[in-house]
Amino acid sequence: MRFLISRKRWAGGVCVVAALFLQAQGSEPRAQKKSHQIQDAYVPQIMALLQKHDDAVNRHDLDTVVEVFAPGPRTVVMGTGPNERWQGMEQIREAYQQIFKAFDEGTMTRQCYWRTGGISGDMGWVATTCKFSDSKQGKARQYEVNVTGVLEKQQGRWYFTSLHVSNVNDR
């Protein structure tokens, strides 16, 4: 399967990477520092979308989970292993129906102890590491995951166009 990226989206991604590189340099002009402060202000918005996702997953609320994803055939959720990818709304719905079977409804909690992200125009990204706990048939479990996501603003609303969740699959 080939993932196609428009020139506009590719350029937006390059701008985000370039902005992060400049931020890491520490010798940026005042206008650039202000721009980065604005970028940092977007991280809570991005994390709020991820929180909406996680709350819906915890409630096993499939319709709300699907609402955080951009409609269309290119939207994708990726897991840890080979061929763990679900593309398009139908496959994403099917994937979450299986995820719901992996833990007891209402038992999932998370604490994200590291996060970063940014927005450039109508494109954004997030990377975070979180500790989760839940239970399966009453047995408590804990695990950590890395999450990365690409977001797109459509008609004034943010959606995930790509969400990648990876963890050691020892559950």
Image (cartoon, rainbow, N blue to C red):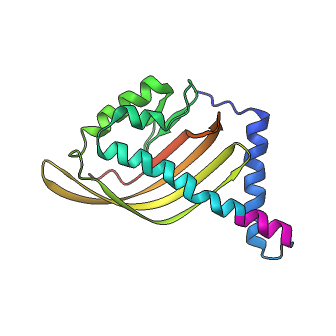
What percent of the width, then of the height, locates residue 166? 44, 50
Quarter of the image with the N terminus is: top right
Q: Position of residue 113 (x, y in %)?
A: 45, 68
User: Does the image show residue 22?
Assistant: no
Front in this rendered view, residue 123 or 25? 123
Q: Nearer the viewer, residue 107 or 94?
A: 107
The prevailing secondary structure element of the residues shown in magenta is: helix
Q: Bounds of the magenta span?
A: 30-37
Q: Position of residue 91 (x, y in %)?
A: 43, 26
Of all residues, the one furthest to the front in this rendering is 156
Which sits in the foreground, 20 or 36? 36
User: Outermost residue toward the bottom?
Assistant: 27
Q: Is residue 113 above or below residue 54?
A: below
Total label count? 0
Q: Is residue 119 magenta?
A: no
> Would residue 153 be found to the left or right of residue 71 on screen?
right
Q: Residue at x 43, y 30 (%)?
A: 92
Judge from the rendering whether residue 141 lies leftward or rightward of residue 31; answer left or right.
Answer: left
2 is higher (above) or lower (below) than 8: above
Q: Position of residue 139 (x, y in %)?
A: 14, 55
Residue 94 appears in the figure: yes
Residue under the image location 52 percent in, 34 percent down: 76
Residue at 72% of width from left, 47% of height from top? 13
